[in-house]
Image (cartoon, grey):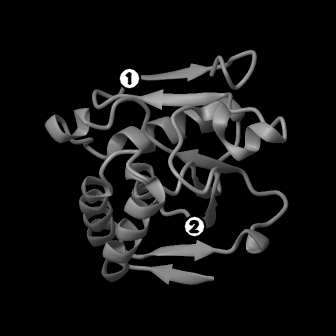
Amino acid sequence: MRTLGEDQIQAIALGAAVLGSGGGGDPHIGSLLARQALRDHGPVTVLDPAEVPDDALTAMSAVMGAPTVLIEKLPGGDEQVNAFRALERHLGRPITHVTCAEVGGLNSMLPIVAAARLGLPLVDCDAMGRAFPEIQMSTPSLSDIAAAPMALSDEKGNTCLIEAIDNHWT
């Protein structure tokens, strides 16, 4: 277990840019959001996957769609919190840990934001090892781990839940 603070964000963003290989959006935008979340909510506890209890409920944090939209319209920050809360209501239990969907690009930074805003530990792992264009291209899909239910939220507070037949449809 270790702590992640604002002073480490620049190094993480640089690594995210390299691992993103040009995909996943600009981690700089995410780094600004992460810095602000850490300023507002304090440092995040980071756990090795082996430190996560067997009964933990982890959820991935990510944004979907064209990352260039974020240049014009930054997220307000509540989107991830609202999506996590919608998923908790659906599952009937609290999410205990945040994980990263992809280590490259913008989505490498947003789990830090979610963990800080939710006061949850962040697990040092991701589902791909780089940026990827579609959720069914992630490593959990290779082990038949369902991406659904998936909760989505917009900046207005609207949420929806996707229950799909497979990860390609999710």
Disc 2, SS = loop
Dot 1 amino acid type: Asn
Q: In which quarter of the image is residue 73?
A: top left
What residue is at 65 percent from the left and 50 percent from the top? 127
Spot occupied by residue 7 in the image (x, y as percentages of width and height): 31, 82
What residue is at 43 percent from the left and 43 percent from the top? 80
Residue for badge 2: 121
Spot occupied by residue 92 in the image (x, y as percentages of width and height): 70, 36
Query: Could one spot residue 167 in this view of the protein?
Result: yes
Q: Residue furthest left?
A: 72
Residue for badge 1: 158
Q: In this view, does 20 lie above or below 79?
A: below
Dot 2 amino acid type: Pro
Disc 1, SS = loop
Query: Could one spot residue 116 in this view of the protein?
Result: no
- Residue 146 versus residue 45: which sits nearer the camera? 146
